[in-house]
Image (spheres, rainbow, N blue to C red):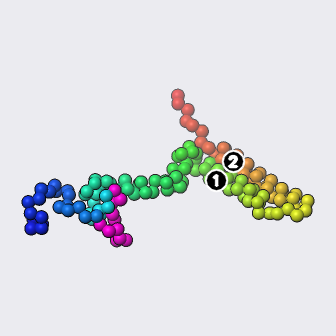
Amino acid sequence: MSEVVPNTPQEFWRPPVAQPAVASGMTEVCQGCGTEFMVGARFCHLCGTSRAALARRSARWTRYLEFHHIREGLALSTGSLVAFFVGVGCVLAAVAVWIVYSVQTINDLWAVQLYRMQWLVAAVAAFAAGVLLKKSPQSKD
């Protein structure tokens, strides 16, 4: 290596010439500076950015889709959260019945209203089950 770049002061963690790597499907590239990560390295050798930090930054929005993060964010138990999702699904089904079905006669109107009422009653039952399944906070004595 000393034949390539003679008399160049070099710090041990930096290469003699910073060459950004071309991003291919086989290599991981630092999104901060564009250089390849060394094999097994947890940090970029040029800018010091962590591989995990880049992964967290790129997938930050996906954590809101994880079940345990939703449960902790809403402070609900598992059963209560499932009942909440069922209730939301029933409300969406009631709205879908209202949008999808067309009314031609008064009998169609009553049928559509009956379907909507059934979905809304199911939603109320699911929300009530969610309230009943919610864990009560521990009393501090």
135 horizontally vs 40: left or right: right
**What's the mark number on residue 40?**
none
Give the residue displayed 64% in from the left and 46% down from the top.
133
Q: Report which quarter residue 136 is drawn in.
A: top right
Magenta extent: 21-32
| Viewer-proximal residue among 41 and 11 | 11
Residue farthest to the right?
A: 106
Return the x and y of residue 119 as percentages of the image width and height. 76, 55
- Identify which residue is drawn at 16% across, 55% down: 11
What crowding class fits label 2: few (fewer than 14 Cα within 10 Å), some (14-19), or many (20 or more)? many
Residue shown at 9% from the left, 63% from the top: 6
Horizontally, residue 42 falls left or right of residue 139, namely left
Secondary structure at badge 1 equals helix
Asked whether, in this view, residue 55 is left or right of residue 100, the answer is left
Q: Which mark is residue 85?
A: 1
Does residue 42 appear in this view?
A: no
Q: Earlier in the sequence, mark 1 or mark 2?
A: 1
The residue lying at 52 percent from left, 28 percent from top is: 141
Residue 13 at x, y percent in the picture: 20, 56
Residue 23 falls inside the magenta stretch: yes
Which quadrant of the structure image shows residue 29?
A: bottom left
Amino acid at dot 1: Phe
> Mostly what secondary structure, the magenta segment?
loop
Quadrant where the N terminus is found in the figure:
bottom left
Which image quadrant for residue 19? bottom left
- Which amino acid, by three-letter code, is at mark 2? Phe
> Can you see residue 33?
yes
- Residue at image mark 2: 127
Q: Secondary structure at mark 2?
A: helix
Left or right position of 11 against 72: left
Tell me how far mark 1 sits from mark 2, CA to CA.
9 Å
